[in-house]
Image: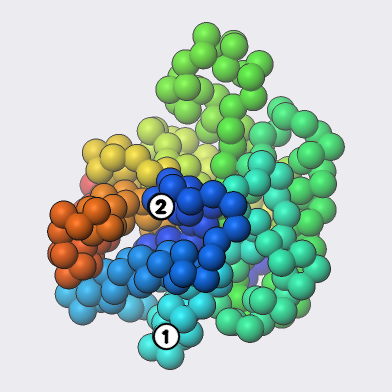
Amino acid sequence: MTIAGFDQPLYILPFDHRASFQTKMFGWKGVLSPEQTARIASAKQVIYDGFKAALAAGIPEKKAAILVDERFGAAILRDAASHGYMTAIPAEKSGEDEFAFEYGEAFAEHIEAFQPTFCKVLVRYNPEGDRALNRRQAELLKRLSQYLREQGRSRFLFELLVPAEEEQLQRLHGNTQAYDLELRPRLMVETIEQLQDADVEPDVWKIEGLDRREDCQKIAAVARRGGRSKVGCIVLGRGADDEKVSHWLTTAAGVPGFIGFAVGRTDFWEPLTAWLAGTITRDDSVNRIAGRYRHFVEVYERGQSI
């Protein structure tokens, strides 16, 4: 068996946040009005302009990508395609503990409408958790994986979150840092194995940052086992601060199989909220987002030489 994979450098600026954007950025609940929807779309345009400013400042287009949703970012996706930028769109319903397609049985139509470089899913999966839940999720993800392989245009980008089970935290006396260091790396390996065995075959695994290089090596090894030699891994930012994200990127950079990152909120949240509050100009927000994105590219590429 050979999976196509994707092993080129990949630096994603993700802003496909939907539920969290609506409630935490704007404080809005329930069904949005057309005006509110347009307001969110205009905020996402600021992030996209930051991405384009970073490209203009020297980030190579062949390494850069955006991840944005259709609901608030359809115009952005169309513009990015017209410029030949790599794009990714989410397939999951936002803010749900169990994976479900955002557009239900029409998921394929929405992928084909934009023909993104990547189709992304965010999935919460703990191999020591609810087995029935894990099985249901794997069945849906297998459908998407098979569809993308047959479609042959959009690659499969899989964002894996492994939230702690209550019993796991109790074993560690509620210490979430101990969970991240001592338990989560092993659970991530087991999750990837289980999903691969269920015929879920991402081209790129988007994973939570790891504090030890040897854990990055284990993740890359399982992602590439059994003929998956071109499958890539990227580090996600988790909305952490600059110091923590830089540590995760430096730890993973240079490990064979790791090809980049997807850092979103750490890039855009503060500059965007400052603009929305009227404390900085739109141009300042765009430039700060561009600068942060470029900063993490530099951090990652420096880490490759360590």
Query: Residue drawn at (43%, 78%), measured in percent from left and top?
Result: 76
Q: Position of residue 84 (x, y in %)?
A: 42, 86
Q: Position of residue 286 (x, y in %)?
A: 22, 67
Q: CA distance from mark 2 to mark 1?
A: 25 Å
Query: With 21 as the anchor, is 155 left or right in this view?
Result: right
Q: How many marks?
A: 2
Residue situated in front as seen by the camera: 106 or 305: 106
User: Residue 79: which numbered mark, if any?
Assistant: 1
Query: With 93 as the anchor, is 169 left or right in this view?
Result: left
User: Residue 35: which numbered mark, if any?
Assistant: none
Query: Residue drawn at (58%, 82%), measured in percent from left and top?
Result: 114
Mark 2 surroundings within 10 Å by alpha-carbon count, few (fewer than 14), some (14 through 19), many (20 or more): some
Picture layout, residue 176 above or below residue 158: above
Element marked by disc 2: loop
Q: Position of residue 168 (x, y in %)?
A: 62, 18
Q: Are marks 2 and 1 in contact (CB under 8 Å)?
A: no
In the picture of the structure, the residue carrying the numbered disc 2 is 26
Q: Position of residue 25 (x, y in %)?
A: 39, 51
Q: Is residue 121 visible?
A: no
